[in-house]
Amino acid sequence: MCLKSENISFGYKRNNLILNNVNISLDSGEVLGLVGDSGSGKSTLCKILAGYENNYEGNVSIDGKEIPSKGYNPVQLVFQHPEKAVNPKWKMKDILNEGQNVSQNILDSFGIKKNWLNRWPNELSGGELQRFALARALGPKTKYLIADEITTMLDAITQAQIWNTVLDIVEEMSIGVLVVSHEKNLIKKLCHDVVYLGDINNV
Amino acid sequence: MRKQFEINSQEKNETKANETKANETKANEIKANETKALLKVEDISLSFIQYASGLRQTELKVISNLSIEAYRGKILAVVGSSGSGKSLLAHAILGILPSNAKLDGKIEYNGQELTQAKKEEIRGKEIALVPQSITYLDPLMRISNQVIGCVEEKNEGLMKKIQREIFQRYDLKPDVERMFPYELSGGMSRRVLVSTAVMSSAKLIIADEPTPGLDEKTLSETLSYFKDMANKGCAVILITHDIEAALKISDKIAVFYAGTVLEVANVEDFKNNGENLRHPYTRALWNALPQNKFQAIKGHQPMQDEVVDGCIFYERCSKKNDLCSKGIPQFKRVNGGVVRCNNVS
């Protein structure tokens, strides 16, 4: 299976394109790095791939088929700031199980403790919240994971813990991962291949 | 009119003479103080009073027995995971904690105790904060007004001139002055935030997570600004979770964990497998970097409401023994650094 974006063009303002004719493809089980300067459109491309942005030209497809706009999206996006991706007025267990019941296996592998489930989001640290965000994104129907700077705000030990777990899970489920990061060493360690956005973007 | 002018110029001369005198004494003072810490934080503890249920109050301890020192011309990096109390330390020094916070212990600035009144007097003048992101700026105010801040009308021209100079030095174009915060890119906003600190001619700069999310070029640029400030004689406290960035410019590194300092190490200690590092946590942090072993130790930092007797790192430590579970280890001086661990000699 292959996630493909073809001839993607997008701009937030008229006559000011951020992405121009961008082609990128991601295979199942592949870990691909995406690198670029700040403000070059990495996060925008991530949003387009995961279906958060609609007003773009070109198409995004899985095995030549368009991604349905209703139902579970097989392309899941995880953000840099997990505290902005959870509902502050819900308890963690509700946030976790909003989409589907997350299996105990996944909870264990991320080291999510039972007593965290009864807490509010503001009672957990960034690293702990990010584990929840990943656990709920890695459901059984997920085929691709877009990781947009998911460990940038975390310390080195938590970063290693989270990535080691994610790599195990995506290998087992043969999920394709797009890793966006500024940290060269991290990209080098994680990815099979690296794409520089400047090279594939014709703006 | 003429008379007034004369008086003014006389006044000016007087103030000038006073200034040179002040400068001389200041220079002497600086010489004498160079070896003394500019900021000394001694054994502070910080807790928040919270309502548990109904009218029952509980005390949540977030910082305990924490001590650090910052010297002129040096950069002290404060490294630790999120929730370890790094930012709260900055807020405690600046006196901007919320009203339900309770601060114990002693903070000394330039040999004088830093009380809340004193903090309010000198913050923004002698102590400056470089905040984490542009969310600390007013979204509806033009950049130059924010950088200059509130000044008396007669000083406005002068301040404007200084601001132009600083902007030029940091490669910010004149049209940035009239922009609003949302129009800035990540790198530009960083330079604007740094110029607010430079503007104040502060002696102590506290930078709270100034680096995450920056690309390599902007990152090294930002770090060089702080190095510049230190070279000019400022004491810089660089709060970050990014050891790599800290190692590039700092002189000493204080490692935070669960609201206390576990080790203060020299930059040279971070090499190879970390065998020169004193605390097992620092070593684990070093070995977890992707360019090193990318190895993670198990477990989590204890929650703030978990009560831990003994060493705070006990649960996750590979070298623990019976002694570690009883009482907090005291600071020891080892190889030019300090460490809070029983198993180091």
Image (spheres, coloured by chain):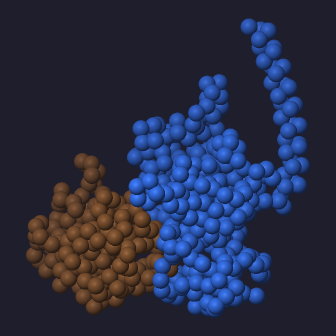
Please give left or right for residue B135 compared with residue B206 in the image. left
Residue nearer the viewer, B6 or A73:
A73
Please state the horizontal and vertical placement of residue B155, each as a whole percent of the image. Answer: 65, 28
Q: Quadrant of residue B103?
A: bottom right
Which corner quadrant of the image does residue A200 belong to? bottom left
Q: Quadrant of the C terminus of chain A?
A: bottom left
Among the chains pictured, the one given brown colouring is A
Residue B188 in view (yes/no): no
State left or right for residue A165 relative to residue A10.
right
Residue A166 horizontal/vertical position (percent): 35, 83
Task: Say which residue appears at 87% left-offset and 49% top-offset.
Answer: B29
Residue under the point 69% across and 73% down: B264
Task: Residue at 21% x, 77% y: name it.
Answer: A101
Say if B49 sits above or below B254 in the image. above
Q: Pick the residue in front: A14 or B343.
A: B343
Residue B186 vs A169, above or below: the answer is above
The answer to which image quadrant residue B104 occupies is bottom right
Q: Is residue B161 visible?
A: yes
Q: Residue B19's spot in the image, x, y percent?
A: 83, 35
> In which quadrant will I find the N terminus of chain A?
bottom left
Relative to B213, residue B333 above or below: below
Q: Residue at x 25, y 88 (%)?
A: A173
Please, which residue is most extreme toward the front here?
B55
Q: In the rendered image, what is the letter of the chain coloured blue?
A: B
Q: Return the x and y of residue B234 as percentages of the image width and height.
A: 72, 54
Q: Is residue B318 above or below residue B237?
A: below
Taking depth in this image into account, of A162 and B186 the one nearest to the observer is A162
Badge count: 0
